[in-house]
Image (tube, coloured by chain):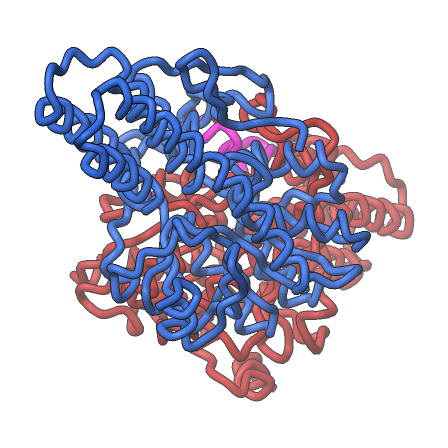
Chain colours: A red, B blue
Amino acid sequence: MPINPIEWENNRIKIIDQTQLPHKLKFLYLDSIEKVKDAICKMKVRGAPALGVAAAFGVVVGVQDSTSRDFNQFKREVEGVCRFLRSSRPTAVNLSWALDRMYRVVVNNAEFSLDKIKQKLAEEALCIMEEDRQCNRAIGEKGASLINDGDTVLTHCNAGVLATAGYGTALSIIYQAKNEGKKVKVYVDETRPLLQGSRLTCWELLREAIEVTLICDSVAGELMREGKINKVVVGADRVVANGDAANKIGTYSLSVLAKENKVAFYVACPLSTIDLSIASGDEIPIEIRSDEEVTTFCGRRCAPEGVDVYNPAFDITPSRYISAIITERGICRAPYEESLRIIFGG
Amino acid sequence: MPINPIEWENNRIKIIDQTQLPHKLKFLYLDSIEKVKDAICKMKVRGAPALGVAAAFGVVVGVQDSTSRDFNQFKREVEGVCRFLRSSRPTAVNLSWALDRMYRVVVNNAEFSLDKIKQKLAEEALCIMEEDRQCNRAIGEKGASLINDGDTVLTHCNAGVLATAGYGTALSIIYQAKNEGKKVKVYVDETRPLLQGSRLTCWELLREAIEVTLICDSVAGELMREGKINKVVVGADRVVANGDAANKIGTYSLSVLAKENKVAFYVACPLSTIDLSIASGDEIPIEIRSDEEVTTFCGRRCAPEGVDVYNPAFDITPSRYISAIITERGICRAPYEESLRIIFGG
């Protein structure tokens, strides 16, 4: 892949400011937890796996100028950093998952000097980033087996390079299928309100010379009815023990339309997105975002003043609508309680 | 209703320029068929019943300065005007329906002077407008019987006052239910790409003091899954003999989501929108509109250059997803071949 959406450079997190795409390829350098949180909240960096990587480096940034004098003080400092970053976005579990993993580095290395622990934290964050890239490639390889030459695939939001440390989840499958010589056409939902589909997914698919057609979100169902879509492939922000999946608002609707029209519906995500601590999708916290995302566009008002808005960022797709969940370790199918437990080695 | 979306004033068609809403309530005066066609193509006036009324007055405007010397010349002139206006938008049948009705006025009055025929044409257009208002009120009265106190109703696009000569079709039902003292809450899909839901429906519902919440199109399914919507009520651009309905893109998806979640799905339209000459929805011509509606917003590009776009303005809802079709003469239910024939007195 020719572009790294997130990197660690001179003790700063280097990210692409995704709010500027597709107009400008602008990089941001984050050197404080305030900047990291702001970038996450404003969706300058987004996508469940990328949020995990950003949060991990956020901890490194947060403690690199630590003035703690002893381990207990340092541990409390890390706890504070984790609490601060954890509150930025609630739905994608990767953020919490990465913070938990970073915190374990601290508690598991109490015997080392603070400098050594900081070094181990930096190593862990780099490891999380590198693992994400490897996971994404593996997801692509496993998932490409489900794609046939000549398929037309629908995707929603952005589960591509830009949502990860590289390669993508859902789009990794497309990229790999193409590498294997399969001709794949992709329809991309624009994905209101923030247009990650038109702004980000179209941008990266065009860069990779994939045949892409942009549609409004409400067009996908009709295309399925007309038999013009063979498969739906989306990412996820959190998959829980029974296979229910939280993903960008609109995903649930696509899954129902896919089932009604006998179109396969695949969710692609790394194990770091799977949260076995939660039994069903009803328990996943759903982030409600600001009215302005819906009522304005490029600063211009497009709805009457005074109107109420309901703007959930995610919805829940019950697992009965999901044909398969594609992970780096393999493809899970219903019953998901069993297949997900097995893939975790349980 | 405090506002007339279309009027006949000093030999000109007075319309609200709906592209300016909700920012400006600007009126346009159309005194040539070129201006009428432009207003229709650019959706300054839109909505199936309103298109019928605009087309009817378009014929009046088109012949009011006629230089024809005899009946046959005049008839050919009217044919030319009708052909010109008919080509403006293909899906809503009301446009053709109104032009056919105006043309019949000409051929049925060959014995009269041209001035008299012109007068009869103006009377016919006024009659079409007045009939539409009466139909809408009747649709409201019939349809309100399906709405319960405390219902939460979803609507899509704009099938309100602004889509008609007054009162609306789907929204007429909401207005009437409110008049009957029923408390109704309305969710409105913003309706990409042209945002008729946020710009027009929210605007007119707020004016009528209806409790309204704006959502992105992709939110509707999740709300149904969560049990937060009791009924879906939409308009139609063309309903055919088997009950299939063409309506704003996204309607089909809502109908599937409604069925899956056991939510009633109602189509409200006057008989002038029902085209018994066509057997099934597959035969309805679907207008494909410009890429720019999707790739730009308020003149600002929101998708990468070079991306392909597919932008159908309508989709087809097969009648098996429609709980009832509400007309001015009564409520039709499946089997629609029979109930629609009966309502036409056949």
Residue B311 in view: yes
- Left or right, A171 with reference to B117: right
Residue at x 62% of width, y 54% of height: B154
The correct choice, above or below, for B8 with respect to A129 in the image is: above
Assess whether residue B11 is covered by the magenta stretch.
Answer: no
- How far across and down, in percent of the image, does residue B243 sit? 38, 66
The one of A279 and A84 positioned closer to us in this rendering: A279
The correct choice, above or below, for B242 with respect to A124 in the image is: below
- How far across and down, in percent of the image, does residue A274 sit? 60, 69
State the residue lying farthest toward the front: B111
Residue at x 66% of width, y 53% of height: A95
- How far across and down, in percent of the image, does residue B262 sit? 60, 74
- How far across and down, in percent of the image, does residue B152 sit? 71, 57
The one of B270 and A59 positioned closer to us in this rendering: B270
The correct choice, above or below, for B148 with respect to A78 in the image is: below
The quadrant in which the C terminus of chain A is found is bottom right
| Part of the protein shown in magenta | A5-25
Residue at x 70% of width, y 41% of height: A309
Residue at x 49% of width, y 26% of height: B6
Assess whether residue A18 is covered by the magenta stretch.
Answer: yes
